[in-house]
Amino acid sequence: MLKKSENHMPLYIDLAKIVKNRIAENKYQIGTKIPSEMELQKEFSVSRTTVRKALKVLSDENYLIKLPGKGTFVSDKRNEIETQNQKFSSLTDSAAKTGKKISNRLISINSITGDDEQNTFLQTNAQQQIIEIKRLRYIDDIPFCLEWIWLAPKYSAIKDEDLDMPLYKILRKKFHINPGKGKKTFKIAFANREESFLLNVDEKTPLMRIKDLVYDDHNFPLHITQEIIRSDKFTYAVNH
């Protein structure tokens, strides 16, 4: 049975760490299928929701990949494409270069407990709540991107701003902060029910998932962003 840890972290975080350790110890090998949600649920005596949240954390970190109709497999992280940029370019800037108009619709903004990756990058701890912004983005009024933005607690005043505006415009105006360098990670994802509904695609449609780790112009961590993008509506070019 999985018991709640002394540091009061959610059970799904502890379960994600156990699965991650099994991958590191080669108990779950690259390319192999891990136990099903029901098997993990029985092994650790936790709810199905806890298992699903743990697997989502590991999928977001590219330790696992879920193949529709087949199960969840250990991903080869070497297949990630990463780019390092000395000057970070936003999605809005990239679209503007093609003559396209980007607009946004705020879905939600919440204070949440960050996962290991978020707390490490944003330099926060498990007792602090980070800011999570969720938006649907449009290109020429067609939905093409579901976006999550995570910021450190010091940016909590952003909740009072018009979050349909471009993020960097808000950060410059409200906090006098500019983006500096960053890292992009590209991965293929498959549309779940929510993504298919919001992006107007069939469920299980292949989509492009982009994760950004962005520093400000003083080289301090600024934000993490994850974008689920319809590649038929927007394409990135990567220079090597």
Image (cartoon, rainbow, N blue to C red):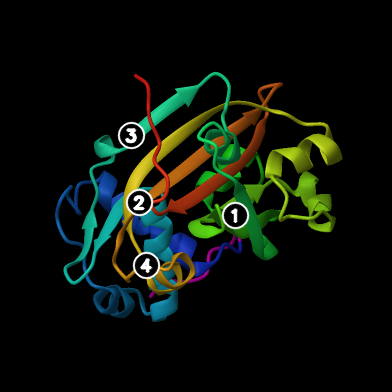
In the rendered structure, which segment of residues is drawn in magenta?
Answer: 1-7
Cα distance in 3D space between marks 2 and 1: 32 Å
Q: Nearer the viewer, mark 2 or mark 1?
A: 2
Callout 2 touching callout 4 (CB < 8 Å): no
How packed is label 3: few (under 14 Cα within 10 Å), some, or many (20 or more)? Answer: few
SS at mark 4? loop
Asked whether residue 225 is drawn in magenta, I would say: no
Q: Which mark is residue 201?
A: 4
- Residue type highlighted by circle 4: Val
Q: Which mark is residue 92?
A: none
Pointer 3 residue: 81
- Residue type highlighted by circle 3: Ile
- Figure check: 155 above or below 15: above
Residue 153, horizontal then vertical, whole percent: 75, 49
> Quick one: label 3 or label 1, which is nearer the N terminus?
3
> Quick one: label 2 or label 1, which is nearer the N terminus?
1
Residue 11, horizontal then vertical, whole percent: 49, 68
SS at mark 2? loop
Q: Is any part of residue 202 visible from this angle?
A: yes
Residue 47, horizontal then vertical, whole percent: 41, 81
Residue 135, horizontal then vertical, whole percent: 61, 59
Pointer 1 residue: 114
Q: Which corner quadrant holds the N terminus?
A: bottom left
* Res 238 quadrant in image: top left
Q: Residue at x 18, y 72 (%)?
A: 69
Pointer 2 residue: 232
- Residue type highlighted by circle 2: Asp
- In the rendered structure, the answer to whether residue 139 lies left or right of residue 222 reads left
Q: Residue at x 26, y 49 (%)?
A: 23
Q: Nearer the viewer, mark 4 or mark 1?
A: 4
